[in-house]
């Protein structure tokens, strides 16, 4: 790679990536000053398409579309390693929620900065977030230069008063995000799950999402207990309850979907729901069953990929998540051919872009230049019999060296601007958060 041009992160001109491997072919990629891919052609074939401001030698790199993390609680980076090896409900009620009660907006700002740093370093250019103080999460994401969809985690626990508070917080966030008019930041509604949000709350979320023309982000059928309790309380399974409340739409991202049966998958396909597979989180929390990817694909649902939060993964490396997904599906459903490498990468890129309604996810002319360069000189990428195989089964985020989002460099030759300050700020915020919680207990 050429020496780092000192203002490369500020440049807003056009970029040419030369001689890079895309889908098994060596090509040049021309990106115009608006950050759009304007030409992908044979080596040396597209140089005169743009007035080149920056040229990047891609001859030692494989290019893939920016990875799209469709389920995070990004600022949970501050809780990484705080509570491990527990069942979901105990983990939430005994450890996570008591600590989250002491979160501040500054905590979410630093936690999200750290999350964006980690995501950029491992090739993620867009993520779907559900948490607290989401205005601060959006501020951090804008500073880091990648794309985010933000939902206030809506939990009413069946209480009218809390529902009103959550409604106001959701409306405030949505108008804040829309008011920014920032193409990289979008809003969504985030009803947490059927066991934490009343049917009245679910119906409000669905209606508000429809009215605002935004997405819905929700945890669905993560555990068998969730399904059993839902049937006992409402006489129907979570997907049917959500459908009755209007929550199943083509703009819904349903996280986990582990305990869906075949009829649930057919309903998801009929409604065009996006099912976010979170294999590392599901295995770490031992939720007991893998998402039935084969049924969701068979019935036409869009499957995408997510990491969940850093307290149940514990990182945000989507290349690692691609491997977990491809292996878990084969193991869980006893099929050596289920979710092959190329398909697993597509789920993590095009599948995620479709779920969030963003134009990236593929390296094609007219798409936003959300591009990740993977280093071919790494051991995990050598030999290069098959790039998709190396990307899905051998490499992790550590093989990524350069990342563009909307044609702008967010990492260049393994340099991310402001990294040291982000690590310091997030570490200090995490330590102060735990101290506050301990002082209060
Ligand atoms: N306003 C809400 C905030 C909810 S944010 C989203 C919540 O989901 C929690 N969470 C993280 N991972 C999971 C998961 O896998 N399943 C269910 N909840 C999770 C996370 O800790 C956070 O509390 C409240 O009053 O609590
Ligand atoms: Zn979650």
Image (tube, rainbow, N blue to C red):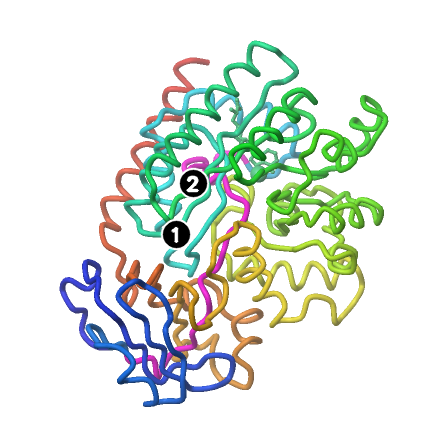
Magenta stretch in the rendered image: 57-83
Q: Nearer the viewer, residue 340 or 166?
A: 166
The residue identified by callout 1 is: 118
Q: Nearer the viewer, residue 87 or 307?
A: 307
Quadrant hosting residue 416 = bottom left
Q: Is residue 69 magenta?
A: yes
| Disc nearer the start of the sequence (2/1) | 2
Q: Mark 2 touching mark 1, by CB under 8 A?
A: yes
x%, y% of residue 334? 80, 63
Image quarter for ligand 1 equals: top right
Q: Secondary structure at mark 2?
A: helix
Question: Marks 2 and 1, Cα distance to the nearest angstrom?
Answer: 9 Å
Q: Nearer the viewer, residue 343 or 374?
A: 343
x%, y% of residue 420? 24, 49
Q: Is 246 situated left or right of 15 in this image?
A: right
x%, y% of residue 429? 32, 32
Q: Is 269 situated left or right of 58 in this image?
A: right
The residue carrying pointer 2 sits among few (fewer than 14), some (14 to 19) or many (20 or more) residues within 10 Å by Cα, namely many
- Please report the residue visible at 27 percent of the width from the left and 72 percent of the height from the top: 15
Q: Is 375 situated left or right of 316 in this image?
A: left
- Circle count: 2
The residue identified by callout 2 is: 77
Q: Is residue 246 above or below residue 21?
A: above
């Amino acid at each position: 790679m050429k020496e780092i041009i000192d203002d490369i992160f500020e440049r807003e001109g056009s970029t040419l990536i030369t001689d890079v491997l895309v889908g098994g072919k060596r090509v040049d990629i021309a990106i115009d000053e608006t950050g759009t891919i304007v030409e992908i052609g044979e080596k040396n074939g597209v140089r005169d398409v743009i007035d080149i401001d920056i040229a990047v030698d891609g001859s030692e790199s494989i290019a893939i579309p920016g990875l799209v993390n469709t389920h995070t609680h990004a600022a949970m980076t501050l809780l990484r390693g705080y509570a491990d090896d527990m069942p979901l409900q105990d983990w939430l009620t005994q450890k996570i929620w008591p600590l989250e009660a002491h979160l501040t907006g500054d905590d979410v700002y630093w936690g999200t900065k750290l999350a964006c740093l980690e995501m950029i370093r491992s090739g993620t250019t867009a993520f779907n977030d559900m948490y607290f103080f989401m205005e601060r999460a959006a501020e951090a994401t804008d500073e880091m230069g990648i794309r985010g969809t933000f939902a206030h985690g809506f939990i009413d626990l069946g209480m009218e008063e809390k529902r009103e508070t959550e409604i106001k917080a959701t409306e405030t966030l949505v108008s804040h995000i829309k008011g920014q008019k920032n193409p990289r930041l979008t809003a969504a509604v985030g009803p947490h799950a059927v066991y934490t949000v009343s049917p009245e709350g679910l119906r409000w979320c669905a209606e508000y999402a429809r009215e605002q023309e935004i997405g819905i982000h929700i945890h669905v059928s993560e555990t068998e207990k969730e399904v059993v309790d839902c049937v006992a309380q409402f006489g129907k399974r979570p997907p049917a309850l959500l459908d009755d409340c209007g929550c199943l739409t083509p703009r819904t991202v349903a996280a986990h979907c582990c305990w869906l049966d075949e009829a649930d998958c057919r309903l998801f396909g009929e409604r065009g729901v996006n099912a976010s597979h979170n294999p590392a989180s599901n295995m770490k929390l031992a939720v007991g069953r893998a998402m039935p990817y084969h049924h969701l694909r068979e019935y036409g649902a869009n499957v995408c990929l997510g990491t969940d939060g850093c307290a149940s993964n514990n990182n945000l490396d989507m290349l690692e998540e691609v491997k977990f997904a491809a292996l878990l599906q084969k193991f869980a459903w006893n099929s050596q051919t289920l979710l092959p490498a190329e398909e697993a990468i597509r789920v993590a890129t095009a599948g995620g872009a479709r779920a969030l309604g963003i134009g990236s996810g593929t390296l094609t002319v007219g798409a936003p230049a959300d591009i990740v360069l993977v280093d071919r000189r790494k051991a995990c990428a050598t030999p290069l019999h098959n790039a998709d195989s190396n990307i899905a089964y051998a490499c992790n985020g550590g093989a990524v060296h350069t990342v563009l989002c909307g044609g702008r460099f967010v990492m260049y030759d393994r340099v991310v601007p402001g990294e040291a300050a982000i690590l310091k700020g997030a570490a200090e915020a995490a330590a102060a958060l735990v101290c506050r919680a301990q002082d209060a207990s």
